[in-house]
């Protein structure tokens, strides 16, 4: 029992949690508005989409790759679906929006999977190419204008609220958006996949040592296709949720956001070299980065300083573990058998 | 005999790129005779390619040692903004201000390079991660320093660099050419250059051969970031503005050009000639697309689509040729 | 007539022009312990990989579990009941001990739900069988080498294997653990499970083998019941040379020559303990012992990679600190590493680049730039000096044979004119002709005043060239043999220990 406790305390997730608590306490001390329900709900709304996308990033990172095309898949799948629904003059349930976009996302993800599995090219390079391909293609062939006419169901959903409270920083009210539940459900599903299915453990195995995985009978190609298809689907769901929350399908709304989300997942304990990472850690990383990015305004930090703050957090978050690993290596006994 | 080997390179990849460039030139000349083959067009292309080209050279050397540098754009912008701020109080003294600005920009480049080099070379942080962190930090500092907006009002001497031309060749392009030559000399005529290639090829063997891996990485990133700050100066001179967010999409394009130019993603190989040809090819394709698609929608979008498709095609063909090559090559194996 | 599990006939394997195996026959009966013996480079690993379905043979055929096999992949091997434990242990460092052990049955062999409890149960059952305890939740990558090897063995025992192949399974194990493992192997035999035990530790082979097969340079040179071999015969079969302990005795260097290198009680926890050694210019000292004896870490220590935490190292009488590779080089120490392909060479780069990298900082012309012509001439000089068979120095070293590749590594270090040269396994994977040449080279270098330390498994080679041989075990030096004084008995000690 004590070893499990010890392991828990030393884990990356715990460190991030502590960091979040510390930062939250400091911010609240300076500006109690931080802990108000209104502010928390606003924060959650902002982080819902990031959280959904982070799940996909986590899956790829565990397998040993870095995917930068997920914002493209999210935007393009959503935009394509919105275009189709508009053309068909669909004005019904918001679920259909999800149901149309997700297969598109899966298909786009499978293209990534094809190049990674078949040609054994690093995911980073493949997804650099597909990111450009998807964005360029969508903008050129489908047009570059955001679509504001979304199905009625989607518009209704965007205005929904589970709990309504007075606005923290101004007049009116704000609410906890039910989209958070989508994130929660997806998070649980991904967690189940990673911890309780064989294919999930195989993803970890591939990330740990792909050569050995193959030797041990893992069908690496199949796993990779499944992986990238899933990531594509998750991205699409994230994209539709994004469009819903902001009430328009913007073909480039998430462009440029890939590095921040990857950074958040890495902060949460995923290794960029693969084999490690948890859902809880990733979501905590997203939360920490979200707090740093959005709530520092509450302590009077000008908006221009946000990026620096994030940068500092990232440098500490990558530098400190590296330093620790370095010291460990120096004290080791050579690693090899003798 | 040697001269022949220069004009007819043995490298299949380089021959392919030359073919593409010539093909594009011929095609466009035929289709858009007046517009393509004009000196105005060539000057315009030469200008456009100058800062992108310098950034590409920076990315190239970061990738040769087996890493990557995602912070190049941020370094360029930070250098430009710092320079702008340094020049502001010297508003009256044009030449002095310009010199100060340039020196400051280069210093910023060195500092950024040291930060990257220490993180990657001495602390062992993976390059993607380290430069992702520094990209954010440097960009953030640039944002703070500039107040989030573009800075203007530079000395005329600086703008002159951006607009002047020597024998029809724009000065920024001359700077690019000088940078290309300097990088070529570095990689092919200095001990550091050879060491960089070998470090990228096999860091373990490099360590066992007595190479100071950390130091080489540090020097590489300093050079890389200094090149980035030179690019920043060029942009400042050309556009008369320093912006914290300029060229954030350039990073992807530089990686595309470098990969197209034959640099292995894992490091250890790649030639300046290949990267230069890829740069030219892409610039011509870009211009060509602009010309051909006039009126058919925003050609920038199609260009991005084409770049993505091109990268994927090249990746696939490189992978296929690697497979056939390893089947043919003579390799010794310890059984 | 006992059932034959595996029958391989006429197996050959070429890797693009290089023949790793040639016309090898091997058959393993049910419930038999077959030992495959051979030096590094003899083809053992390739043969095992073919058995495991990782490589397809270039010629020959094999019958496994009664079925002739044409296309044969790792999953086919697993299904046929063949489990291979590779030398790298094939572990997932990021997964837990239980997951690693139960991997084949709970992760790759199953679709759907993964149950940690079931994996733990499977793992603990097999660990009980092996009579060892391990923390099931620990991450495999955090374990010491010993435990990792045990996990690898446990993983192989989990499946319904009919044949378990163990490639050098006892490298990191202590005597006690080795005995436990050998007991497990004998237990498997009682259950009717066959074992292909690959080892070059002759006393282990002697203890458990029913049927011994010897490979040398890719061909089978002996195959008989275990008791047909005595130790000396085995070594002769493995190396192709008779052990001539009375022949070629190196003339000892006079005592009044000032000591070049002196190690005085150096220790590094977990690696080696209280090692002392003196080396005079002109001497060649050999160090041998099992893997895990500390000989490899000692070598790395001399090269500055694993500095000792106590004790002193002195060079030419003055104490020195070897805290980095740079320190070692500054004191004139050169190092030819064990793994030529990953540690010694840049395979895709030219012979020239591989040779000059060590001294490239000083090959400059008057402008301070690299003197390219000098790099070429320097490389050509060394190619000639060491008789490296290559038409130009610009071709990639990957095109060279093992012997020539090793000479490139030697050239790299010799071009820096070291005073002390440490070599780990200098003739591994090298053909007989090159072996002789390299040993002659070492003698010549010693004759010119270099101090040389050779770490090797190859006793005949050490006898051929060393003035003194040190035997290490468990991190300490247990015996020192002066070449001139080696008797049949001390030779046996040497052979048993390696």
Image: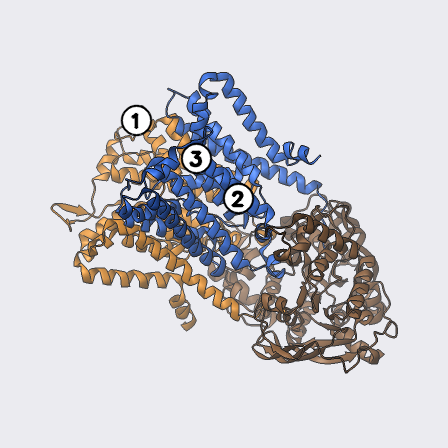
Chain colours: A orange, B blue, C brown
Please tell me whether mark 2 or mark 3 is closer to you in this view: 3
Tell me the element at label 3: helix
Q: Quadrant of the C terminus of chain B?
A: bottom right
Determine which quarter of the picture holds residue B326. Answer: top right
Label 1 vs label 3: CA separation?
Answer: 51 Å
Is residue C140 found left or right of C184 in the rendered image? left
Residue A288 visible? The answer is yes
**Chain containing the residue with disc 3:** B
- Asked if badges 2 and 3 are on one and the same chain, I answer yes
Q: Residue furthest left?
A: A171
Label 1 crowd bin: few (<14), some (14–19), many (20+), radius 10 Å: some
Q: Nearer the viewer, residue A61 or C388?
A: C388
Q: Nearer the viewer, residue C349 or A61?
A: C349
Where is mark 1, residue-wise?
A86
Is A270 drawn above or below residue C180 in the view shown? above
Is C486 drawn above or below residue A83 in the view shown? below
Tell me the element at label 2: helix
Label 3 crowd bin: few (<14), some (14–19), many (20+), radius 10 Å: many
């Amino acid at each position: 029992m004590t070893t499990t406790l010890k392991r828990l305390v030393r884990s990356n997730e715990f460190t991030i949690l502590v960091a979040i608590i510390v930062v939250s306490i400091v911010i609240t001390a300076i500006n109690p508005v931080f802990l108000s329900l209104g502010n928390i709900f606003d924060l959650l709304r902002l982080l819902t989409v990031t959280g959904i996308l982070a799940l996909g990033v986590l899956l790829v990172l565990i397998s040993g790759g870095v995917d930068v095309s997920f914002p493209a898949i999210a935007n393009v799948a959503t935009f394509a679906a919105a275009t189709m629904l508009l053309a068909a003059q669909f004005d019904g349930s918001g679920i259909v929006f999800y149901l149309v976009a997700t297969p598109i996302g899966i298909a786009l993800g499978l293209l990534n999977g094809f190049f990674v599995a078949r040609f054994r090219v690093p995911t980073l390079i493949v997804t650099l190419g597909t990111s450009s391909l998807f964005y360029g293609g969508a903008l050129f062939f489908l047009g570059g204008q955001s679509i504001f006419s979304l199905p009625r169901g989607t518009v209704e959903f965007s205005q929904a609220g589970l709990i309504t409270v007075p606005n923290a920083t101004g007049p009116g009210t704000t609410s906890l958006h039910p989209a958070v539940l989508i994130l929660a459900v997806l998070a649980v599903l991904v967690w189940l996949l990673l911890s309780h299915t064989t294919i999930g453990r195989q993803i970890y195995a591939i990330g740990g040592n792909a050569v050995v995985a193959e030797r041990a009978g893992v069908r690496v190609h199949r796993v990779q296709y499944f992986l990238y298809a899933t990531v594509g689907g998750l991205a699409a769901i994230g994209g539709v949720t994004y469009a819903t929350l902001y009430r328009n399908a913007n073909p480039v709304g998430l462009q440029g956001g890939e590095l921040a989300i990857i950074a958040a997942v890495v902060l949460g304990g995923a290794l960029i070299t693969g084999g490690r990472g948890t859902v809880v850690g990733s979501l905590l990383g997203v939360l920490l980065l979200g707090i740093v990015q959005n709530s520092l305004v509450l302590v009077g930090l000008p908006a221009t300083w946000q990026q620096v703050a994030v940068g500092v957090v990232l440098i500490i978050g990558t530098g400190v573990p590296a330093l620790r690993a370095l010291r460990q290596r120096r004290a080791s006994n050579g690693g090899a058998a003798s | 005999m040697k001269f022949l080997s220069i004009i007819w390179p043995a490298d299949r990849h380089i021959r392919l790129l030359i073919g593409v460039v010539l093909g594009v030139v011929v095609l466009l000349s035929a289709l858009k005779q007046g517009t393509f083959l004009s000196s105005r067009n060539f000057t315009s292309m030469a200008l456009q390619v100058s800062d992108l080209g310098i950034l590409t050279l920076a990315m190239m050397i970061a990738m040769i040692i087996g890493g990557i540098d995602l912070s190049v754009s941020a370094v360029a912008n930070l250098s430009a903004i710092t320079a702008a701020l340094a020049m502001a109080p010297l508003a009256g003294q044009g030449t002095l201000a310009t010199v100060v600005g340039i020196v400051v920009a280069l210093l910023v480049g060195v500092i950024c390079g040291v930060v990257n080099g220490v993180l990657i070379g001495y602390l062992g942080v993976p390059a993607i991660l380290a430069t992702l962190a520094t990209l954010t930090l440097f960009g953030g500092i640039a944002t703070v320093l500039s107040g989030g907006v573009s800075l203007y009002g530079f000395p005329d001497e600086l703008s002159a660099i951006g607009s002047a031309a020597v024998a029809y060749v724009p000065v920024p392009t001359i700077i690019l050419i000088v940078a290309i030559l300097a990088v070529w000399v570095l990689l092919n005529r200095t001990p550091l250059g050879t060491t960089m290639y070998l470090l990228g090829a096999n860091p373990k063997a490099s360590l066992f051969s007595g190479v100071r891996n950390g130091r080489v990485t540090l020097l590489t990133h300093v050079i890389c970031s200094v090149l980035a700050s030179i690019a920043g100066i060029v942009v400042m001179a050309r556009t008369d503005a320093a912006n914290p967010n300029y060229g954030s999409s350039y990073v992807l394009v530089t990686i595309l050009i470098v990969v197209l130019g034959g640099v292995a993603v894992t490091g250890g190989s790649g030639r300046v000639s290949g990267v230069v040809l890829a740069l030219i090819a892409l610039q011509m394709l870009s211009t060509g697309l602009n010309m051909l698609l006039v009126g058919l929608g925003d050609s920038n979008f199609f260009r991005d689509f084409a770049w993505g498709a091109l990268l994927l095609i090249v990746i696939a063909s490189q992978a296929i040729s690697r497979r056939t090559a390893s089947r043919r090559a003579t390799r010794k194996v310890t059984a | 007539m006992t059932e034959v599990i595996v029958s391989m006939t006429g197996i050959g394997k070429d890797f693009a022009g290089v023949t790793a195996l040639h016309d090898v026959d091997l058959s393993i009966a049910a419930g038999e312990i077959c030992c495959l013996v051979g030096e590094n480079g003899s083809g053992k690993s390739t043969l095992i990989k073919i058995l495991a379905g990782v490589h397809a043979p270039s010629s020959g055929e094999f019958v496994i579990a009664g079925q002739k096999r044409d296309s044969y992949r790792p999953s086919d091997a697993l299904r046929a009941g063949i489990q291979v434990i590779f030398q790298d242990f094939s572990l997932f460092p990021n997964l837990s001990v239980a997951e690693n052990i139960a991997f084949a049955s709970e992760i790759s062999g199953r679709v759907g739900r993964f149950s940690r409890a079931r994996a733990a149960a499977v793992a603990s059952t097999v660990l009980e069988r092996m009579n060892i305890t391990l923390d099931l939740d620990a991450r495999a990558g955090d374990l010491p080498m010993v435990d990792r090897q045990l996990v690898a063995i446990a993983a192989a025992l989990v499946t319904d294997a009919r044949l378990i192949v163990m490639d050098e399974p006892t490298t990191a194990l202590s005597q006690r653990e080795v005995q436990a493992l050998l007991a497990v192997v004998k237990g498997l035999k009682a259950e009717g499970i066959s074992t292909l035990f690959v080892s070059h530790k002759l006393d282990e082979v002697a203890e458990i083998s029913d049927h011994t097969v010897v490979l040398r340079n890719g061909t089978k040179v002996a195959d008989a019941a275990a008791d047909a071999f005595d130790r000396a015969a085995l070594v002769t079969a493995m190396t192709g040379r008779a052990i001539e302990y009375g022949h070629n005795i190196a003339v000892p260097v006079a005592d009044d020559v000032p000591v070049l290198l002196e190690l005085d009680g150096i220790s590094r926890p977990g690696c080696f303990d209280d090692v002392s050694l003196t080396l005079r210019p002109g001497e060649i000292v050999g160090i041998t012992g099992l893997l895990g004896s500390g000989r490899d870490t000692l070598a790395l220590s001399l090269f500055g990679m694993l500095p000792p935490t106590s004790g002193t190292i002195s060079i030419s009488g003055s104490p020195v600190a070897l805290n980095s590779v740079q320190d070692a080089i500054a004191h004139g120490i050169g190092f030819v590493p064990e793994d030529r392909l990953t540690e010694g060479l840049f395979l895709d780069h030219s012979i020239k680049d591989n040779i000059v990298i060590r001294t490239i900082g000083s090959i400059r012309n008057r402008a301070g730039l690299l003197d390219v012509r000098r790099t070429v001439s320097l490389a050509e000089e060394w190619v000639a000096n060491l008789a490296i068979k290559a038409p130009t120095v610009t071709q990639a070293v990957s095109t060279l044979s093992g012997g020539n590749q090793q000479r490139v590594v030697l050239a790299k270090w010799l071009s820096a004119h070291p005073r002390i040269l440490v070599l780990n396994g200098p003739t591994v994977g090298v053909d007989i002709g090159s072996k002789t040449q390299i040993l002659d080279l070492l003698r010549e270098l010693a004759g010119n005043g270099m101090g040389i330390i050779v770490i090797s498994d190859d006793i005949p080679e050490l006898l051929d060239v060393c003035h003194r041989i040190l035997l290490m075990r468990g991190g300490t030096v247990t015996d020192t043999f002066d070449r001139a004084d080696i008797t049949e008995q001390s030779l046996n000690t040497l052979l048993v220990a390696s």
